[in-house]
Image: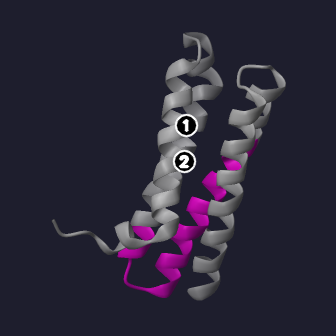
Amino acid sequence: MHKFDFEKLDVYQIALGFTGKVYDLFEELPYRIQKSVGDNLLRAAISIVSNIAEGSGRRGKKEKRHAFEISQGSAFECIPTLTILHNKKRIKSETFEDLYNDCHIISKMISGLITHFS
């Protein structure tokens, strides 16, 4: 099976794994939490991986960089939601730390892509 170029990127694979973890967490949340902060978290996680894919397919440096910047912003957007869920004891400390660390790694890797296309 052929792969798209973005599927070969380590950051894409890590972001895809992160999104899977967020999806699993979303399914565990009570319905009213899903409809408030859960939806926002899931959309932001999907935006990370989607914009990595989109950016890799853009032809110009400026367009690539812009998509990667959106992806990084979405990674940053996940942190407050994860923190709120953790502070309200809706997720365990281990889950929070794992997802937080994933966001940190993803953000640093995306920074590298942004720098590369600057």
Decide whether residue 57 is among the magenta residues.
Answer: yes
In percent of width and height, residue 82 lies at: 72, 36
Tell me if residue 100 comes above or below residue 4 in the rendering: above
| Residue 31 painted magenta | no
84 lies above or below 116: above
Identity of the amino acid at label 2?
Phe
Q: Which residue is mark 1?
A: 22
Label number found at residue 88: none
- Residue at x-position 60% and y-position 11%: 32
- Where on the picture, by quarter, is residue 54? bottom left
Amino acid bearing label 1: Val
Q: Are marks 1 and 2 in contact (CB under 8 Å)?
A: yes
Task: Name the residue carrying label 2.
Answer: 18
Magenta region, residue range: 54-79
Percent of width and height locating residue 78: 67, 44
Q: Main secondary structure of the magenta part?
A: helix
